[in-house]
């Protein structure tokens, strides 16, 4: 669903929200480079936030904090195995 071909993106986002089957987000990975696919997925998440009244900035901050905790756990685990 990259910029030039994001046809009916709004329908796609509505289907994801309606179904609550968020694994559909992974469909953006099909046949695209990771950079393009992940940009499309993040764009869809931003649309979902807007439609659900969720702050994208708050969600991104919470996600960043969770990411950093998880990365620290992995690093700590790897260091303890040395």
Image: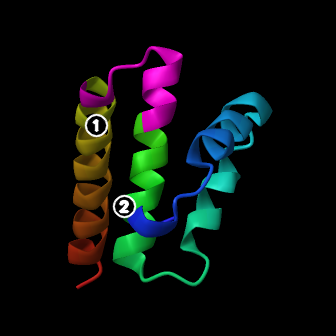
Q: Residue at x 32, y 53 (%)?
A: 70
The answer to which quarter of the image holds residue 22 is: top right
- Disc nearest the viewer among 2 and 1: 2
- Label 1 environment density (alpha carbons within 10 Å; few <14, some 14–19, many ≥20): few
User: Is 30 left or right of 75, judged from the image as shown?
Assistant: right
1 part of magenta stretch:
no
Q: Which residue is mark 2?
A: 39
Q: What coloring was used for the rendering?
A: rainbow
Mark 1, secondary structure of its residue: helix
Q: Residue at x 31, y 68 (%)?
A: 77
Nearer to us in this view, 12 or 68: 12
Image: 56 above or below 29: above
Q: Quadrant of the C terminus?
A: bottom left
Nearer to us in this view, 6 or 41: 6
Q: Which residues are magenta?
A: 47-57
Image: 76 above or below 52: below
Q: Which residue is mark 1?
A: 60
| Sooner in the amino-acid sequence: mark 2 or mark 1 | 2
Q: CA distance from mark 2 to mark 1?
A: 14 Å
């Amino acid at each position: 669903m990259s910029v030039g071909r994001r046809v009916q993106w709004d329908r796609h986002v509505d289907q994801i929200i309606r179904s609550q089957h968020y694994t559909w987000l992974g469909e953006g990975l099909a046949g695209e480079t990771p950079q393009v696919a992940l940009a499309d997925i993040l764009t869809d998440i931003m649309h979902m936030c807007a439609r659900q009244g969720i702050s994208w900035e708050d969600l991104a901050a919470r996600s960043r904090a969770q990411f950093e905790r998880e990365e620290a756990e992995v690093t700590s685990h790897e260091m303890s195995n040395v």
